[in-house]
Image (spheres, grey):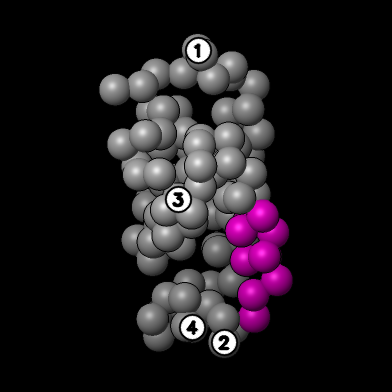
């Protein structure tokens, strides 16, 4: 998949929210997208990725953010916002989402 295959709602819920926090976080979800077969697969894998990221330690964050890690509590807050966005997104039927 490519970002152009996502609905506007999914794009905003995950990628834009990640970008508002840090571009390096957006990269992680962007990489994930390339391995997904459809939008629902992407949202499910995003939830799994968030779950994994919640377990990251300071060294993992340093690696992920290329030596300029955010504070752990800020990182966890960003992950929670993305997760909450996904929960809200799932309430919108796929056929009611906006696609280009």
| Quadrant in which the N terminus appears | top left
30 relative to 72 in the view: left or right: left
Q: Secondary structure at mark 3?
A: helix
Residue 50 magenta: yes
Which badge, 2 or 1, is on the more N-terminal residue? 2
| Callout 3 touching callout 2 (CB < 8 Å) | no
| Distance from Cα at disc 4 to Cα at disc 2 | 5 Å
Q: Residues within 10 Å of mark 4 (few under 14, many from 20)?
A: some
- Which comes before the other along the chain, label 1 or label 4? 4
User: Earlier along the polypeptide chain: callout 3 or callout 1?
Assistant: 3
Q: Which residue is mark 2?
A: 59
Kind of element beneath mark 1? helix
Residue 21 location, x and y as percent?
42, 56
Task: Identify which residue is drawn at 67% across, 65% down.
Answer: 52
Instruction: Using the numbered discs, state the Cα–Cα distance from disc 1 to disc 4 in whole angstroms.
Output: 39 Å
Q: CA distance from mark 3 to mark 2?
A: 24 Å
Q: Which sits earlier in the primary sequence, circle 3 or circle 2? A: 3
Q: Eyeballing the image, is 51 above or below 93?
A: below
Question: To which residue does mark 1 refer?
Answer: 96
Residue at 47% over, 83% down: 63
Q: Quadrant of residue 67?
A: bottom left
Q: Which residue is mark 3?
A: 33
**Which callout, 4 or 3, points at the residue further toward the start of the chain?**
3
Confirm or deny contact between disc 4 and disc 2 (CB under 8 A).
yes
């Amino acid at each position: 998949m490519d970002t152009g295959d996502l609905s506007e709602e999914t794009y905003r819920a995950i990628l834009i929210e990640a970008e508002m926090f840090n571009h390096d976080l957006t990269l992680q979800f962007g990489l994930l997208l390339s391995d997904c077969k459809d939008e629902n697969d992407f949202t499910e894998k995003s939830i799994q990725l968030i779950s994994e990221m919640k377990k990251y330690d300071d060294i993992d964050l340093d690696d992920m953010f290329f030596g300029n890690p955010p504070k752990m509590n800020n990182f966890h807050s960003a992950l929670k916002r993305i997760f909450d966005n996904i929960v809200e997104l799932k309430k919108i039927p796929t056929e009611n989402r906006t696609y280009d």
